[in-house]
Amino acid sequence: MTLSKFYMDGMILARKEKWRYGQALFNLLLSVRPELAESLRGTDMDPFYLGGPADDFDRWDRFATHIEKEWYKERLSTCVSCQIETPKAYLKKVEAFGVKGLVCQDAPACQARSVVQRALTRS
Ligand SMILES: [Zn+2]
């Protein structure tokens, strides 16, 4: 699940269940990333009692910053071309023409794209 889908699903859940937005995000987090939810339960970044950022901007900001930092942590992998650690969701598998492993699928900065593209069009 991407982070933006998480926030979107939280919004839908809040409306459906008539929950506060922070409550919905916490409960959703509990089901998709339980260890991450538990790591902020009862701390100064727990959003549970917040209806949104306006209720306590600092708390909401700490929550959002923490989530963004942790979200893809366990899902990072290294692009075989540019050697940059990237969320696996943004990498694609390549096994052709001497290129084996994961490469950035949509990063203009990554040289892999052109190299792989060239290799593939040569077939
Ligand atoms: Zn790359």
Image (cartoon, grey):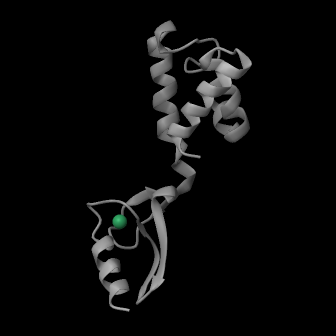
7 left or right, relative to 109: right
Pinpoint residue 123: horizontal percent, then vertical percent.
38, 92
Pinpoint residue 35: horizontal percent, then vertical percent.
68, 39
Can residue 51 be seen in this snapshot?
yes
Residue 118 sits above or below residue 24 on the image: below
Residue at 41% in and 59% down: 85
30 left or right, relative to 73: right
Quadrant hosting ligand 1: bottom left
82 left or right, relative to 78: left
Residue at 55% in and 55% down: 75
Residue 30 sits above or below residue 88 on the image: above
Residue 99 sits above or below residue 73 on the image: below
Pinpoint residue 98: horizontal percent, then vertical percent.
41, 89
Q: Nearer the viewer, residue 72 or 120?
A: 120
Q: Nearer the viewer, residue 95 or 48?
A: 95
Residue at 30% in and 79% down: 115
Can residue 41 be seen in this snapshot?
no
Residue lying at the far top of the rendered structure = 55
Residue at 54% in and 45% down: 2
Pinpoint residue 109: horizontal percent, then vertical percent.
26, 61
